[in-house]
C-alpha cells in the first residue's frame, strides 16, 4: 500500500445510531398517507420523521398490499 492508502485507513469513525424506535401501526399509516399525498414526497417524509427512505417504501408496499 502507498502512503495515501495507509493514512486513510488510520481514521475510523463510530456513529451512534441510538436505540431502535418502535412505530405503532397508526403512526406508520400516518407517515405512509403523508408520503402518498403528493408526488415525490417519500424522501421528504422520511427525513421529517427520521427514518430511512427504503423503510418508508417498504411500509408503502405493505400498505398497498392490504388495500387490494
Image (cartoon, grey):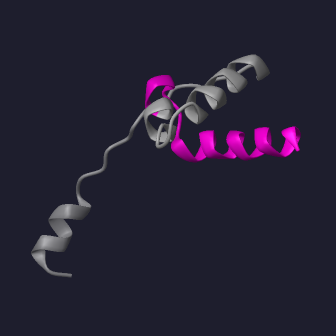
Viewer-nearest residue: 68 or 20: 68
Q: Position of residue 2 (x, y in %)?
A: 14, 80
Viewer-nearest residue: 9 or 46: 46
Q: Residue furthest left?
A: 3
For residue 33, which quarter of the picture? top right
What secondary structure predominates along the stretch shown in magenta?
A: helix
Describe residue 62's horizontal placement relative to residue 56 as left or right. right
Q: Does the magenta stretch include residue 59?
A: yes
Q: Position of residue 3 (x, y in %)?
A: 11, 74
Q: Residue 7, relative to residue 24: is it above or below? A: below
Q: In which quarter of the image is the C terminus?
A: top right
Residue 20 visible, this orientation: no
Viewer-nearest residue: 37 or 60: 37
Describe residue 12's horizontal placement relative to residue 52 as left or right. left
Q: Position of residue 15 (x, y in %)?
A: 39, 37
For the record, the magenta segment spans 47-68
Viewer-nearest residue: 46 or 39: 39
Q: Quadrant of the N terminus?
A: bottom left
Q: Which residue lies furthest to the front in this view?
A: 38
Point 65% across, 31% down: residue: 32
Q: Is residue 27 magenta?
A: no
Point 62% across, 45% down: residue: 57
Describe residue 30's horizontal placement relative to residue 17 as left or right. right
Point 30% across, 50% down: residue: 12
Amino acid at each position: 500500500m502507498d502512503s495515501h492508502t495507509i493514512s486513510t485507513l488510520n481514521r475510523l469513525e463510530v456513529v451512534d445510531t441510538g436505540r431502535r424506535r418502535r412505530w405503532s401501526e397508526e403512526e406508520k399509516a400516518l407517515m405512509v398517507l403523508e408520503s402518498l399525498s403528493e408526488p415525490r414526497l417519500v424522501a421528504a417524509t422520511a427525513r421529517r420523521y427520521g427514518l430511512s427512505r427504503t423503510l418508508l417504501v417498504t411500509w408503502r408496499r405493505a400498505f398497498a398490499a392490504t388495500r387490494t
